[in-house]
Image (cartoon, rainbow, N blue to C red):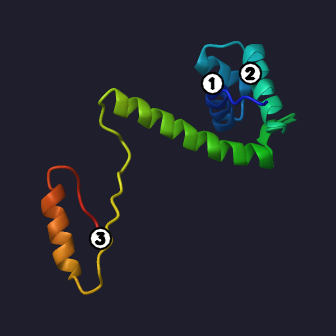
Amino acid sequence: MPFLNYHHLRYFRLIARDLNLTRAAKKLNLSAPALSLQLKQLEESLGHQLFERRRAGLVLTEAGRLTLDYAETIGRAGDELLDVMQHRPTGGRQVLRVGAVATLSRNFQLEFLRACLRSRCEVRK
């Protein structure tokens, strides 16, 4: 059964941002061969090559672009989890969706919500 390693995704994100394994390895305080091995393990877990290795550097494959989208989402969720569990304010915007009957005035709804949430956040239409 394939196993998805959170660290592999973190490493992949840094490599994908720089498109350079050596620079990413320096940022992570790892050797380039060690980071290359981690990338290879992620590619084996996913069953796809994530980069094309070219003379000019690395280029994301289609599978790499898709994986990067997921890795970014997972990374943000992980960061948010740490913030919540350590009682740190989150940097992201929280969304509250409210449904109401069409006959209830929109202005009334907005003013009601502003009063309810005044100390918590800004309310936008």
Residue 87 point in image, percent of width and height: 29, 30
Tell whether 68 sits left or right of 110: right
The residue drawn where x is 19% and y is 64% is: 113
Which type of secondary structure does the marked residue at label 1 adopt?
A: helix
Which type of secondary structure does the marked residue at label 3 adopt?
A: loop
Quarter placement of the N terminus: top right
The image quarter in which residue 25 lies = top right
- Do residues under tags 3 and 2 come within 8 Å of each other at their CB atoms? no
Instruction: Residue under label 1, please give it.
Output: 7
Residue at the extreme bottom: 103
Q: Calculate the distance from the C-alpha at mark 3 to the C-alpha at mark 2.
A: 45 Å
Q: Calculate the distance from the C-alpha at mark 2 to the C-alpha at mark 1.
A: 9 Å
The image quarter in which residue 84 lies = top left
Q: Does 6 sit above or below residue 120?
A: above
| Of 94 and 68, the residue lying toward us | 94
Tell whether 97 sits left or right of 79: left
| Image disc number at residue 118 | none
Quarter placement of the C terminus: bottom left
- The amino acid type, in three-letter code, at marker 3 is Lys
Labels 1 and 3: the sequence-earlier one: 1
Structural crowding at the residue carrying mark 2, measured as other residues with C-alpha within 10 Å and reported as few (<14), some (14–19) or many (≥20): some
Q: Does 124 sit above or below residue 72?
A: below
- The amino acid type, in three-letter code, at marker 1 is His
- Do residues under tags 2 and 1 come within 8 Å of each other at their CB atoms? yes
Structural crowding at the residue carrying mark 3, measured as other residues with C-alpha within 10 Å and reported as few (<14), some (14–19) or many (≥20): few
| Of 34 and 79, the residue lying toward us | 79
Instruction: Residue under label 3, please give it.
Output: 125
Q: Calculate the distance from the C-alpha at mark 1 to the C-alpha at mark 3.
A: 39 Å
| Of 91 and 42, the residue lying toward us | 42
Instruction: Residue under label 2, please give it.
Output: 38
- The amino acid type, in three-letter code, at marker 2 is Gln
